[in-house]
Amino acid sequence: MSAAPARAPRTFVPSAPRPTPAWRPRLSVVPSPRPARSLVPYLLLCAAILSAALLGALLLNTHMAAAAYEIHDQQVALSRLDEAEASLRAQVEEAGAPATLQRRAAELGMVPAQGLRFIRLADGALLGAGEAG
């Protein structure tokens, strides 16, 4: 057996040139598409806005609760002051009652006035019990 090929090598015979069509599309260089932007900055912005909104709502709610406690404390203090005022008014009315005034005057050694007289300012005449003016 020999190392020669069993067939003779094939030789390439060019055929007749192909006819080119009269119309050919124009080809141009197309720029490569831009690489897609990352979504990380957008997601971080959304997360920051959401966090700020939640934090704002939390702070507002906290301040409202603190204000509600302060209002409650002030209302309790106001009701105590109203009770104290009512008590003081009752004491003043009791002290100004005629029976209380008479008792206090007697304790101080005062006696009822006898023969009250009045001055008429128009002519300076004395009016009152005991004398005719």
Image (spheres, rainbow, N blue to C red):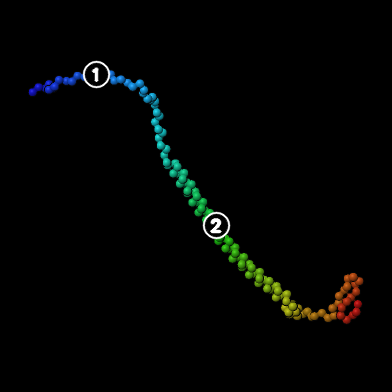
Amino acid on which disc 1 is placed: Pro
Q: Residue at x 79, y 80 (%)?
A: 111
Check the image and report above or below for 27 versus 90.
above
Residue 34, how many percent across, how many down?
41, 33
Q: Residue at x 66, y 71 (%)?
A: 86
Which quarter shows the N terminus?
top left
Q: Please, what secondary structure does the residue beneath circle 1 have?
A: loop
Amino acid on which disc 2 is placed: Met
Numbered mark located on residue 14 in the image: 1
Which quarter shows the C terminus?
bottom right
Q: Residue at x 75, y 79 (%)?
A: 102
Residue 40, how many percent across, how many down?
42, 42
- Residue 121: quadrant of the picture: bottom right
Tell me: 4 left or right of 113.
left
Tell me: 61 left or right of 113.
left
Visible residue check, residue 97? yes
- Residue 30: quadrant of the picture: top left
Q: Are marks 2 and 1 in contact (CB under 8 Å)?
A: no
Check the image and report above or below for 78 versus 54.
below
Numbered mark located on residue 64 in the image: 2
Residue 66, how many percent across, how many down?
54, 58
Using the image as rendered, state which of residue 85 and residue 32 is in the foreground: 32
